[in-house]
Amino acid sequence: MRLVLLLLPIVFFNGLCKSDVMTAPMHKGELQALYLVIQGFTGNSLNVSQLYSDPCGWTPIQGVSCDIFHKLWYVTSINIGPVFDNSLACTPQAKFNQYIFEFKHLRSLSFFNCFSSQHPTKIPSNAWKHLSESLEKLEFRSNEGLIGKIPKSFGHLTNLKSLVLVENSLTGDVPQELANLVNLKKLSLSSNALSGRIPASLGYNNSMNQLLILDFSRNSITGPIPSSLGSMISLLKLDLSNNNLNGMLPLELGNLRNLTLLDIRNNNISGGLTKSLQCMASLQDMLMSNNQLDGRIMEFRWENLRNLINLDLSNNSITGEIPESMVSLKRLRYIALDNNQIIGSVPSNFASLPCLKALYLHGNSLTGRLVFSQGFYERLGRRFTAWGNPNLCYSGGYVPPTGLKQCDN
Ligand SMILES: *[C@@H]1O[C@H](CO)[C@@H](O)[C@H](O)[C@H]1NC(C)=O
Ligand SMILES: *[C@@H]1O[C@H](CO)[C@@H](O)[C@H](O)[C@H]1NC(C)=O
Ligand SMILES: *[C@@H]1O[C@H](CO)[C@@H](O)[C@H](O)[C@H]1NC(C)=O
Ligand SMILES: *[C@@H]1O[C@H](CO)[C@@H](O)[C@H](O)[C@H]1NC(C)=O
Ligand SMILES: *[C@@H]1O[C@H](CO)[C@@H](O)[C@H](O)[C@H]1NC(C)=O
């Protein structure tokens, strides 16, 4: 049934009659290459060519898809690893076979949970240009034993829309050749051991203006955030968290008008929020804890970020008072300002934020009286903290569980 559904559009567009399609043979070279490639990953414990005599037809290999070009079947998609319940498993000795570069119409190639640390493997560094015409999606995910560098030759894959290299053991720099991938919508290199700087070529000359997701989180990347990222104007999510980035947030990030997530947590970013960032009106998640952001953050016109839901500024070096404009953001749900050097009083209109679920203020130098109602304290429970502000006290009959002392009257 699945086969028929798959075939109908092809019948329609190619003007072939159904029986032609059913009997169309697979391109011979493709068939041989497919057996060699699959056998390389599954090992010799099963005989792939014997089990799957017609891999694009009656005996499909789970994770392999095909399509018809000029009356012959070609492989268009290969997913290696336990993606489906009945996928072929990788042997611990899984290896790349060079025939993987022979497929003429391969659009999607993915490896999930395949390369094990018992037998560390590198991504082949050459030959990727053979797939440059066709490949749109390339993914290596959760391969503990995938080591070595990201090949520079990935830069030949100029039709890629998605490059995902997540949760592997890749090391070395982010190659600047990735800047050639101007059709990318998603670039994720999260959770590897990458080092070096973010190449300033990425996004240079507005070249990556279709990118929607850029995720370099959980690596050991150093140096500043290049201003060229500000030209990726379609970007929705920018995640650089858990690296060793330093320097200030570049002015140009303010061009990212559609950005909904900006995550720079756990880096060494300093300075404040430049005025230009006030233009990021789509921002919902501004996550910046554990950096060295300073007082200039408070001079910011928060009221422009009217879509903000989660604001995390914990563990920085922020000074100054909590601006009233921050407390005007009606969608705010989570506010963490703890462990800074914030002074002044706590605005009572926090209580009027309709969605507020968490407010962390502990470890600052706030002063004066907390004047929230019992209902407010009960609503937030342990998600309200204010201890560690020596000159802050509570007033009113209700004793909030804040660890603060009652104000003298
Ligand atoms: C798999 O089976 C085919 C056909 O029976 C045979 O020609 C081939 O040598 C076998 N391959 C392996 C790796 O055993
Ligand atoms: C940017 O564009 C200029 C002018 O078109 C060109 O000379 C330069 O090589 C480009 N730089 C990059 C890094 O693509
Ligand atoms: C930003 O989002 C709007 C609304 O979804 C869309 O129309 C616009 O094209 C986007 N801008 C860019 C530069 O992608
Ligand atoms: C963070 O930056 C400061 C100076 O800007 C430097 O002294 C410190 O070593 C850096 N910390 C880390 C963890 O890189
Ligand atoms: C802030 O730092 C403290 C102490 O190092 C740590 O326990 C806490 O988890 C940090 N907060 C965040 C949001 O990471």
Image (cartoon, rainbow, N blue to C red):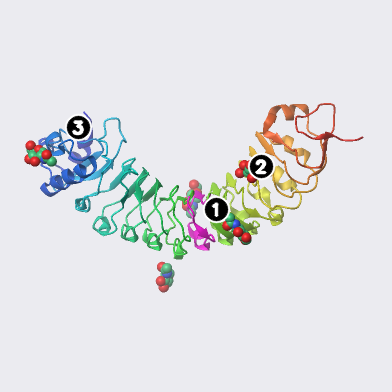
Residue 277 lies left or right of residue 57; in this view the side is right
Question: Is 358 left or right of 322, judged from the image as shown?
Answer: left
* Residue at the spot of label 3: 4
Instruction: Residue type at mark 1: give it.
Output: Arg
Task: Give the percent coordinates (x, y) of residue 213.
Answer: 45, 49
- Is residue 206 one of those drawn in magenta? no
258 displayed left or right of 83: right
Q: CA distance from mark 1 to mark 3?
A: 45 Å
Give the residues in magenta: 219-241
What residue is at 85 percent from the left and 30 percent from the top? 396
Given this view, does label 2 or label 1 mark the residue nearer the observer? 2
Residue at 73 percent across and 38 percent down: it is 350
Give whichever of 257, 73 is nearer the camera: 73
- Identity, as a three-letter code, of the amino acid under mark 3: Val
Q: From mark 3 to mark 2, how far is it between C-alphas?
A: 55 Å
Residue 307 seen from this side: no
Front in this rendered view, residue 38 or 345 = 38
Residue for badge 1: 257
Asked if the beta carbon under badge 1 is closer than 8 A to the nearest atom of ligand 3, the reply is: yes
Q: Is residue 163 above or below residue 201?
A: above
Q: Which mark is residue 51?
A: none
As drawn, which residue projects farthest toward the front?
118
Disc 2 under 8 Å from ligand 5? The reply is yes
What SS does tag 3 mark? helix
Residue 240 belongs to magenta span: yes
Q: Are marks 2 and 1 in contact (CB under 8 Å)?
A: no
Residue occupied by mark 2: 336
Instruction: Choose the circle earlier in sequence order: 3 or 2.
Output: 3
- Locate residue 364: give its quadrant: top right
**Pointer 3: residues within 10 angstroms few (<14), some, or many (20+)?**
few
Q: Residue at x 16, y 48 (%)?
A: 33
Task: Select label 3 or label 2 by which is in front.
Answer: 2
